[in-house]
Structure formats: C-alpha cells, structure tokens
Amino acid sequence: MPPILGSRKIMIVDDEETIADTLALIFSSNGYDARSVYSAEQALETLEVWRPDLAVIDVVLPGMNGIEFAIFLKASYPDVHFLLFSGQPGTGGLLEEAKKKGHLFEILAKPLHPTFMLATVANMLSAPPSDASHLPN
C-alpha cells in the first residue's frame, strides 16, 4: 500500500538534476512528499525549513560530498534515514576515509530501478534509523 500523499517526506540530493528530479517525480507519484536539491549545501539550507523522513544522497557532489553530508545528517538529525548511491566507480576512497573516522556506510550503484528504489525506501521507513544506511534483506 503506497503512503498517504504527504505523509512521508523524501529529499533527493544529487548534482545531476535530471536524476534528482526524476527520482522526486517517482516518489511523488507513489504518494511521498519528495523534493530534489542539487548539492549538500542546498540540502543544508532546505533542512532549516523542511525536515525529510529520508534523504537519498549521491556520494559524488560538488563541495561537501555525500558521505560528509550523511555524517552531518546522522549527527545533527538522527531521526532522518538516509540512503547513499553513486554512479561513479572509485568512491571506495571516500568510504575508507569515513571508516577511519568510525562511520560505516553501504552505497547502492546507479542506475537504480524504480521498483527496487521504492521497495528499499519503504523498507527503510518501516525501521528506526541506525548508524548505517539500510538495505532490504
């Protein structure tokens, strides 16, 4: 059963505007209140006025990268779920840096099939936030 329109809020953070806007459209079409932003800095500004239940975050972003933003989000907004994804190989270095600081993350690979993305998000939102991003079993 899809969520009631506006009942769950999802922020998509991706510098590829077409991807961010497409994901927002998919989520909105399935009953979520979805907004797309195109940088971590823009996401920070949005958080001041609108709190999502979940942030879908691209790893490779200009300025603050997605992992840095996820670490900030986890520390400042522990009730917000997050999901990291990337279309670029070589994000392992960013993961290693985060691991050295005590943060463990999993990253989903782009492109993401809409059905898989919707199932993953529904699964995440049905569980409490934790120290790592959630993936379906």
Image (cartoon, helix red, strand yellow):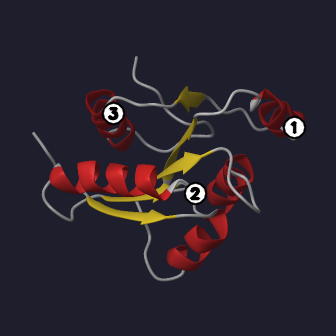
Q: Quadrant of the C terminus?
A: top left
Q: Quadrant of the N terminus?
A: top left
| Residue 14, percent from left and from top | 54, 54
Q: What residue lies at 35% left-to-right and 39% top-to-bottom?
A: 121
| 112 sits to left or right of 87 | left
| 63 sits to left or right of 132 | right
Q: CA distance from mark 2 to mark 1?
A: 22 Å
| Residue 111, percent from left and from top | 45, 31
Element on which disc 1 rests:
helix
Q: What residue lies at 54% left-to-right and 81% top-to-bottom?
A: 48
Which quadrant would residue 113 be assigned to in this image? top left
Q: Amino acid at mark 1?
A: Glu
| First of labels 2, 1 by sequence position | 2
User: In the picture shown, does residue 95 fall above or below 57?
Assistant: above
Element on which disc 3 rests:
helix
| Residue 66, percent from left and from top | 67, 50
| First of labels 2, 3 by sequence position | 2
Q: CA distance from mark 1 to mark 3?
A: 28 Å
| 107 sits to left or right of 95 | left
Element on which disc 2 rests:
loop
Of residues 57 and 73, the one nearer the viewer is: 57
Reading the image, the residue beneath label 3 is 123
Q: Is residue 54 visible?
A: no
Q: Amino acid at mark 3?
A: Asn
Reading the image, the residue beneath label 1 is 97
Q: Amino acid at mark 2?
A: Asp
Which quadrant would residue 115 be assigned to in this image? top left
* Outermost residue, bottom side: 49
* Outermost residue, top side: 137
Reading the image, the residue beneath label 2 is 15
Dots 1, 3 in contact, CB < 8 A: no
